[in-house]
Image (tube, helix red, strand yellow):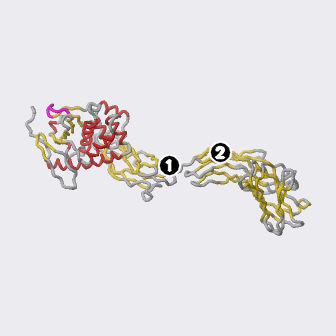
Amino acid sequence: MENTSEALYMIVPDPPDYLNPLPSLGFMGDVSVKPLTAAVEIEAALTQVNQQLTEFVASANFEADLQTAFGEYTDVKLGATIIEALAESSQLPDMIVVSSDLMNGVNGGFDSLTGTVYLSDAIINSEKLVDVITEEFGHYIDFQLNEIDSPGDEGELFMRLVNGEVLSEVDLTYLRNKDDRVMILGGLVEVEANEDIVIDNPANLLPEMSIADTEITEGDRGRSFAEFKVTLDSPSDQTVKVSYTTADGTATVADRDYEPTSGDLVFRRGQTERVIRVPVFGDTKVEPDETFKVILSEPENADLGRDEATGTILNDDGLVSANISIADTQIMEGNRGRSFAEFKVTLDSPSNQIVRVNYATADGTATVADRDYERTRGELIFPRGQTERVIRVPVIGDTKVEPDETFQVILSDPQNAELERGKATGTILDDDDPERGNTLRNPFVLGNLTTDEIVRTDQIGFIKSGKRDVNDYYRFRLTRPGTVTINLDDLVANANLQLLGSGGELIDQSNNPGTQAETIMQRDLEPGIYYARVHPHVSDRTKYRLSINLIS
């Protein structure tokens, strides 16, 4: 060499069993660090580098990151083999520690002609050493993978991906167009170099650090990683550090929702973005989305802005898109006070999410102005797993003789479900006509029969308006073939039950003695109009409960 007479000498250390093997290590020039000290520092740095490379190969983004660094046609399998050998220290390039005055201002470099990594003595005792070695390993990996050097500074690109940075398109464009070649050793050797970054910060202001929320789909098994992006609002000319730790929310460590994670995050000079990766465990339990937190503390060379972030684990087990329906209802008006029309709202399947829907009444022939019912509105909430709720609308009784009247309940703005039947009719059955229910031509109207039981309570055999009530007729419609059951119970005296056809013809009857319940089960009834008739036995008088439903 023309400009130096310093000797090059090599040491081959024999480290203890608990240390990783060192590469062949040499020294050149008037180095400022003792060889043994340099060997120990490089060994410690290699331990960190090896751990980072092991995690990098195991990461979900490994294939994409490798191709980002070394080209889209990179042999990923070969790349993994090379990196694993580096991580195990079984295949390390030779390293030479060089006096900084021979390094032409750079911290490190890789010589592709000899496969040698050069390290400036100025960074041996520096926290920069880990990143410099990682970057030069990136050049070494590229040398092993590609016959032609990848464009730009693939070493720095590799190092920043290994460190978990999420690079913007601007970052990628800059690195892919960067000329990283520098002559060292007085112009004798050309290397792909690691250079210091110069930050323009004349006021010496500290950057502000923030952490962002994130979401991750849980998965069914194994581990995936929730990635929390931590950013500085401006680059720093100092190394920035911050401690971090996880904390339970509805997701807990005890339930094996995620793995507790803590440590120190380091921003090298000029770096503005890092990622904290928290392992999340997959399972097949149907459960709500769950959350945990990552909390930052004890920043060095930065101020804390947003110091807490929420990680949401999105459940993907048994997700069900439920449909909401509301059913029609009927209610006897009554003579005074309030009773309640009950509208049944159902989900066609249970949901693992909270389902909400708004509801409001609307006038029909029954109106709020006429005090037929009270305006009602609100939000109906289905807790997780629940499939049935009831909306209760107050109906106001009176003694006016009037036709049956109707109003509606309308559903809107569902959350975590779809509207299937969003409108229902409530029928207020007038009971002020003394003849209502006494004949086939003026029956109590029950409407369409479904699998939802229709229940009515009344009395029979008593004197009403000067006349004994001996018949209560109930009309219902069957819209499809099926088996119909009719029950008459809650009797205090003897009453009987009949099932009649649309013309009043007898289809079936039940005439049990005393207060025994009466039951009719009629199979394979065809669609059409039918009547249930309740009548007293001879001179008996009794209250009763009538229930009708379609069971198949």
Residue 237: x and y in percent read: 28, 40
Q: How many residues crowd around disc 2 within 10 Å: few (fewer than 14), some, or many (20 or more)?
A: few
Q: Amino acid at mark 2?
A: Glu
Residue at the disc numbered 1: 316
As drawn, 90 above or below 543: above
Residue 540: x and y in percent read: 87, 67
Instruction: State which region is magenta.
Output: 185-190
Residue 380: x and y in percent read: 63, 51
**CB of mark 1 within 8 Å of CB of mark 2?**
no
Decide whether residue 186 is among the magenta residues: yes
Identify which residue, 459 or 322, lies in the foreground: 322
Residue 389: quadrant of the picture: bottom right
Q: CA distance from mark 1 to mark 2?
A: 24 Å
Q: Amino acid at mark 1?
A: Asp
Is 197 left or right of 362, judged from the image as shown? left
Quadrant position of the N terminus in the picture = top left
Q: Which residue is most to the bottom?
A: 514
Q: Main secondary structure of the magenta part?
A: loop
As drawn, 498 above or below 154: below
Which tag, 1 or 2, sits closer to the chain's start? 1
Decide whether residue 449 is among the magenta residues: no
As drawn, 363 above or below 463: above
Residue at the disc numbered 2: 420
- Residue 50 appears in the figure: yes
Q: How many residues crowd around disc 1 within 10 Å: few (fewer than 14), some, or many (20 or more)?
A: many
